[in-house]
Image (spheres, grey):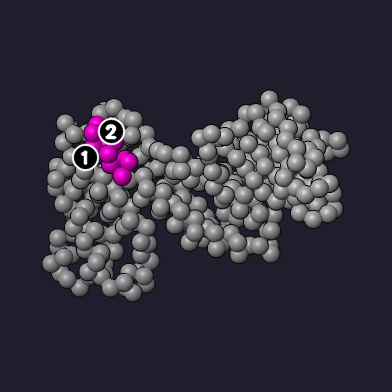
Amino acid sequence: MNTKQQNQVTMYAAVLRFFEEAGAPLVAIKRIAAGRETLAGLVDRIGVASEAQEHTTTGVTRDREVVKAEAAQKAEILRLLVVALTTDAALRGELKTPLSRMLKAKDAELLRYLKKVDDAVDTIEKTELTDAGYDPQVRQTLQTDLAELLATQGAARQIETGTKVATETLPLLLEQATTVLETQLDPFVKAQQLARPELVAQYEVARRIVRTAARRGTEYRGATVPGRPVLVYDRREAGVVAPMLGNRSGKGLTLRYYTAAAATDLPGKEQGLAVKNRAEVHLPDYSKLGPEDAPYLLVVQEQLDGEGRWVVR
């Protein structure tokens, strides 16, 4: 996994952690809950593909069995849809066997059946599929699994093709995860702007991809307004042990960095560290910023004048 891909995965993890913690009230909304679950499943599969790049042959073989089971699960959903909707009696006969029974068949037979189910979806009108509750993501996942299974046949090729397929599969999985964010989470979370503005703001912070440069490491940037706390990052996700706190604001604007138990907390009296404009402060740890176990790093602008700019590396 390259740096850009790792940055994406870090962002996905931050979004999932947000829904587990501060964003839990949003998960009560069914569409958001469904999107979160789909994203979590893709992140798990991204982890498996990433590990497969370094796996031994035994590991890849074990992963292959997991992929077969997952592919069969998705194919069974599609098989039932096709059998229920098709007017082709011959096709119903060809797809009469449940995938649970096909898992016991030889690899070649299973793969042929998975492909037959996948192809059969195209024989049904899109409007009929939509009316029946068809989820295109199910088929996309099946096709990804099927491509991986087709490329990893044969014990002698397990380690070589396992790594190759993992490398080729990762971009597709990352693209699917980003699509879930853009279509199944972003619009429904942002629709809560009036009802839950503080949660929408926290979601947007988690949703931000932090660029990691080889020379300077991870860097976070953003803007402040007077008196309103801004979440820099969740320390548990960022992995920044010794932060550099910077102030890129205009003349006379001071920013106060601090840690807190909640992502919306203001600092206590004299808590944290004030950084004047155009200054940088390098810290060996977070002890000067607040409680040692506080998970969130925040920044607040102290002067009631214009917009501030912060940077943390």
Name the residue at 36% across, 50% down: 172
* Residue 310 shows in the view: yes
Q: Residues within 10 Å of mark 1 (few under 14, many from 20)?
A: many
Q: How many marks?
A: 2
Is 24 rendered above or below residue 239? Answer: below
Which residue carries the number 1 mark?
152
Name the residue at 54% across, 47% down: 209
* SS at mark 2 in the image: helix
Residue 115 drawn at (x, y percent): 20, 55
Amino acid type, callout 2: Val
Which residue carries the number 2 mark?
60
* SS at mark 1 in the image: loop
Q: In terms of depth relative to the viewer, which is nearer, 262 or 313?
A: 313
Residue 227 in the figure: left or right of residue 29: right
Amino acid type, callout 1: Thr
Q: Main SS of the magenta segment? A: helix
Residue 302 drawn at (x, y percent): 83, 46
In space, the residues marked 1 and 2 are separated at their CA atoms by: 9 Å
> Which badge, 1 or 2, comes first in the chain's sequence?
2
* Residue 34 shows in the view: no
Q: Look at the image and give the residue range highlighted in magenta.
A: 159-168
Q: Which mark is residue 53?
A: none
Residue 197 in the figure: left or right of residue 71: right
Label 1 close to label 2 by CB (< 8 Å) = yes
Does 23 lie within the magenta span?
A: no
Is 285 rendered above or below residue 2? Answer: above
